[in-house]
Image (cartoon, helix red, strand yellow):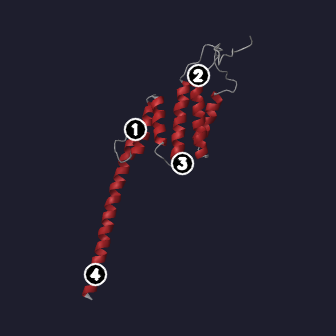
């Protein structure tokens, strides 16, 4: 009987030790997550190398806040190459669309009232990013709202800037009638 009690004590002691190790590990993970959450809430960049995705996402978001839209879009594009989940891809596409939309809004209008080519390009790319976000997560209300706002800015009757017709000859055929 004493041998049996000793074996039971050893088994229960091992289970207790495994449980304590698991509890310590979970407490450590919880501490790391809380540290990252506080950094995000405070608006600081995440400096922990354990979260490279969040670190890059925060860097891209910070670049957008500093009006460096081109680099923010590039950083978000790099995040798409990491193979995120569908909801994360939708969030990234939404942020790409936001940066492109704002980038298009700050472009100047030509003297004749038409949009500059850069603004038109930014709007077109933003529209595609919002649509991609909605393809991935169709219930995303913020993407729907921003897309409708973008479409209201992009009028269908927006004419492009007039282009000069080239008089260059292609393969010895003149352009136009002789």
- Mark 4 neighbour density, 10 Å: few (under 14) some (14–19) many (20 or more): few
For residue 117, which numbered disc appears in the image?
2
1 or 2: tag closer to the N-terminus:
1
For residue 123, above or below residue 28: above
Q: Which residue is mark 4?
A: 7
Q: Are marks 1 and 3 in contact (CB under 8 Å)?
A: no
Residue shown at the point (47%, 34%) measured from the top left: 74
Residue shown at the point (35%, 59%) measured from the top left: 26
3 or 2: tag closer to the N-terminus:
3
- Mark 1 neighbour density, 10 Å: few (under 14) some (14–19) many (20 or more): few
Between the C-alphas of marks 1 and 4, the distance is 54 Å
Residue shown at the point (36%, 54%) measured from the top left: 30
Between the C-alphas of marks 1 and 3, the distance is 25 Å
For residue 86, which numbered disc appears in the image?
3
Q: Nearer the viewer, mark 1 or mark 2?
A: 2
1 or 4: tag closer to the N-terminus:
4
């Amino acid at each position: 009987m004493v041998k049996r009690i000793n074996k039971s004590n050893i088994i229960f002691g091992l289970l207790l030790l495994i449980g304590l190790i698991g509890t310590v590990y979970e407490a450590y993970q919880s501490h790391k997550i809380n540290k990252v959450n506080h950094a995000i809430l405070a608006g600081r960049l995440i400096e922990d190398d354990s979260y490279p995705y969040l670190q890059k996402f925060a860097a891209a978001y910070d670049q957008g806040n500093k009006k460096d839209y081109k680099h923010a879009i590039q950083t978000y594009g790099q995040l798409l190459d990491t193979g995120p989940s569908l909801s994360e891809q939708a969030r990234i596409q939404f942020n790409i669309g936001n940066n492109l939309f704002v980038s298009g809004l700050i472009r100047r209008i030509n003297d004749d009232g038409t949009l500059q080519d850069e603004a038109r390009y930014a709007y077109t790319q933003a529209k595609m990013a919002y649509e991609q976000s909605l393809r991935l997560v169709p219930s995303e209300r913020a993407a729907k709202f921003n897309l409708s706002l973008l479409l209201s800015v992009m009028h269908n009757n927006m004419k492009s800037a007039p282009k000069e017709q080239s008089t260059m000859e292609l393969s010895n055929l003149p352009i136009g009638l002789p």
